[in-house]
Amino acid sequence: MPCPRCGHVSDVAGGPFCSHCGRYLATLQWVAEPPPSTVAPLPMPRPTHYAGPPHYAEPPRWGFPAAPWPAADGPAAPVPPERTARSLAAAAVPLLWALAAVALLAAGAETWRYVLLLASREGALSADAVAASDALVLAAGTGTVLLGLVAGGFVVAWTLPAAVAAATRSGSLPSRSRRELLLGWLVPGWNLVVPGPVLAEIEHGALDRPPSRRPRPSRLAGAWWLLWVVGGVLAAAVLAWSWRAGVQARADGVVLHAVLNLVAAATAGVTAVLVGRLTALLNPVRAPRRLVLAVDHAAMNRAAVNQAAVNRAAVDQAVVRKPPAAPATPA
């Protein structure tokens, strides 16, 4: 048996130790195995067919307790203001587009009423046409007012977290408190002056402009502010005109209502675009990227041919370098 240390071949009858270096010849390998069980394992029955879902003789006592999931200890993490602004904008933008559509319908209804007023000078009008015109004016006007209140509430609520998010993004404090923002939207007269600078400041912070610079509204924000002021002044004029009596005053009131509805539709559409743009700047949503792997079969074929050529050259080189065989010794 050869010795694993010195390689000396020792006789088996000489004992388990090497006669040259004294190393133990046998190779030891300790393997830990569990002791055999004193009880034979039970045979596992193999079902020949599906016997249905598992069932128990009594209700199991394991699993989750039949109780509501406990809340985590400690106060919940505050929601970032830009996420709150995005949630409010998701509700405000569709309402604004709906308001624009209903306001256009109301403008068309007022235009139809004015056409009927012009036609009434030539003769009597159809009762059905007058009733349909009145119903359309009432329905469209009521829908415009209700949608305007709801959409306006969402826009006002959107400006509160949007102003905080824009100030935080630029590393400064909001220039107005929540109370001042609400009063700037709700107080008549003041609500024609405050909303424009508020949206300009939100746009200034969303574009990552330095807070030391004076906010300058973009063309979109400036157009919105102009429409907002024109709509407010026109609404006050319509309200004051409604107190006048006379046939001509009522006809002029119909024209004013039609123009007011057109301005309201334009304001709602521009507001929807502006709110969506500012929300996207404050909290952009990254579109998921998809990686498409394209296989170039021609390149793969060229690589395979090159690899085969390399392998063939290696084999040829090995054959060339192979030493000649030694001559056989005569017996």
Image (cartoon, rainbow, N blue to C red):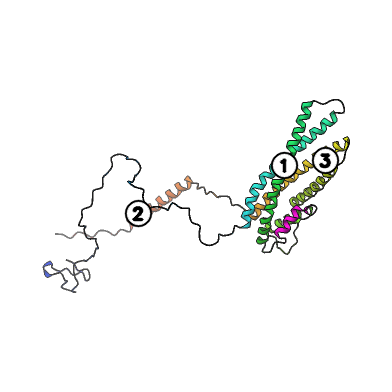
Q: Is residue 224 left or right of residue 55?
A: right
Q: Is residue 67 left or right of residue 147?
A: left
Instruction: Indicate yes or no whether the magenta region holds residue 220.
Output: no
Residue that label 3 marks: 256
Indicate which disc, 2 or 1, sits on the residue closer to the N terminus: 1
Residue that label 2 marks: 315
* 41, above or below 248, in the image: below
Q: Nearer the viewer, mark 2 or mark 3?
A: 3
Disc 1 marks a residue whose amino acid type is Ala
Closer to the camera, 238 or 264? 238
Q: Which mark is residue 117?
A: none
Disc 2 marks a residue whose amino acid type is Val
Residue that label 1 marks: 100
Q: Is residue 84 left or right of residue 19?
A: right
* 310, above or below 262, in the image: below
Secondary structure of the magenta portion, mostly?
Answer: helix
Disc 3 marks a residue whose amino acid type is Leu
Question: The N terminus appears in which quarter of the rendering?
Answer: bottom left
The Cα atoms of the two marked residues, 2 and 1, are separated by 80 Å
Q: Position of residue 308 (x, y in %)?
A: 40, 50
Magenta residues span 174-191
